[in-house]
Image (cartoon, grey):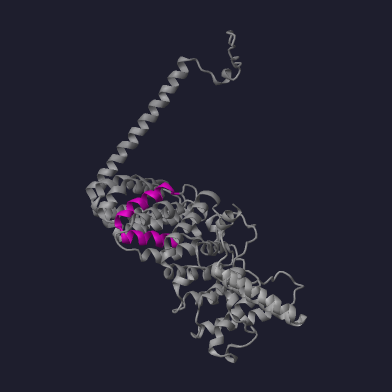
Amino acid sequence: MIKQILRKLPRKSQKSDSLDSAGNDSDNHASNSDDGVQCTNFGNKISSRLRVVKRVSSAVFPASIMAGVEAVEPNLSFNNVSNPQKPNLFISKLNLCCEACNSSDPDKGTAEQDLKRQTLIELVDFVSSGSAKFNEAAIAAMCKMCAINLFRVFPPKYRSNTASGEADDEEPMFDPAWSNLQLVYDLFLQFIGYSSLDAKVAKKYIDQPFILRLLDLFESEDPRERDCLKTILHRIYGKFTVHRPFVRKAVSNIIYTFVFETERHNGIAELLEIFGSIISGFAVPLKEEHKMFLCRVLIPLHKPKSVGVYHQQLTYCVVQFIDKDPKLANSVITGLLKYWPVTNSQKELMFISESEEILEMISMTEFQKIMVPLFRRIACCLNSFHYQVAERAHMLCNNEHVLNLIKHNRQIIFPLIFPALERNSRNHWHQTVLNLTKNTRKMLSEIDDELTLACERKLEEENSQSNEASEKRKLTWERLELAAGFEPAAANLVPPLKPATCSVAC
């Protein structure tokens, strides 16, 4: 019975038996030798096991790829080492620069700062020379060094959210650590633009979390840093095609937060400048995704008060879209009318200028869809008591292309703008606007004198009818006052009525 149970138990393999026997032999041999030999054998076993662990960890954790790289003294110059050792020296110098500089600490010695700066200069010169070769370990070391030195949390903003005109007057704030940050940005920019860089390997380290942290840096108040980031992000977008949809989505989320939540961001102009070049490369016909980007991201950017900071870049992006698809002009003009300012004259000037650029590109079919609401708004601008707004609206009407659109649709547009011109000629306070109004009326008469006279007669009829209506209202109120025996002085002595009380129990 016991023998049958023992037969069912699993037996050891021959390999394990041989290892056990080898282990017993080595133990017996070690027991017969002195203590020094025992320590040596034991140390060799541990070191061999550690080498195996390092090999396994380098395969599982990409950040530990440098563990298998031969260490080279980082203080050596690239000219003093052989070509096979230069990649290892490059990694050693990158590891030396992984300590972030703390320029706000006055007690810290400058020796480490100077050493780090000199090392960064050597790295930039080495990469710019064109002799660098980036294997996976070098790519990982580069991304690690840039992440440690660049990715940081900015202090809270103490500036108030000013309007567009006031924001331009503020002096930019410069980062005191820019001298070292600039070298890191220059190194990373040359690294991204390196012709022999393998994008398939690099995308494992320049991944989506890395790009998100890079986009967070656009919050920097230093315009020099934002300018470097603009170039770097554009290079990443061009080199890593797999990340393009993610970059567009991430930038859209930043703009959503800016428009609908905070209205605070320092890098909107730089982000729009990047997208200006991206939009110019879109294939025709435009994808639905790109059209949605225009309607949901770019058009709502006209809403914030600080639109003047980035309006030039925004207008360029919008014009690029209309150049790709002229039918989008209708959507853009409709969005402009939706966000048209009422009390902000500087913003109104920007909207008139953007409308003029769009009207220079619009087709006749698309113009006829939006000409009525657009010229109603332009008529209000012609009557503006802010002389710059009124002057800019007259200049729009005198634009050659816009004037051609007005000529072809004068039966509808003349009745919309003629009353505004008439009111200007009677009531406006600024002499320049009065002269422009006179010239515009003369121009309309030259285009179609009969229609102009008809508009003038119609306006006179409307004025007479409104005067008659106001007289009738006045007489009606007088009759009501007489019929009611209304005396204003006695009406003030009448005590107010007490509120009625409800006698029904609730």
Apparent side of residue 133 relative to residue 391 in the rendered image (left or right): right
Residue 247 seen: yes
Q: Quarter of the image holding residue 122?
A: bottom right
**Left or right: 161 as drawn, with respect to 190:** right
On the image, the x and y values in percent for residue 392 come to 41, 57
Which residue appears at 49% of the width and 48% of the height? 343
Residue 168 picture location, percent across and down: 55, 62
Where does the magenta region start and end? Answer: 312-340
In which quadrant of the rendered view does residue 178 lie?
bottom right
**In-image side of 308 versus 433 (left or right):** right
- The prevailing secondary structure element of the residues shown in magenta is helix
Residue depicted at 71% across the width and 69% down the height: 104
Foreground residue among 199 and 340:
199
Observer-nearest of 481 and 304: 304
The quarter of the rendered structure image containing the C terminus is top right
Residue 65 in which image quadrant: bottom right
Residue beneath the point at 44% across and 48% down = 339
* 450 or 378: nearer the viewer: 378
- Measuring 55% from the left and 21% from the top, which residue is drawn there? 488
Q: 431 or 378, which is in the foreground?
A: 378
329 within the magenta span: yes
Q: Residue 285: image x %, image y %? A: 29, 59
Q: Is residue 382 visible?
A: no
36 relative to 176, above or below: below
> Is residue 50 a member of the stretch shown in magenta?
no
- Residue 184 image position (x, y, % from top left): 58, 75
How many dots with numbers? Answer: 0
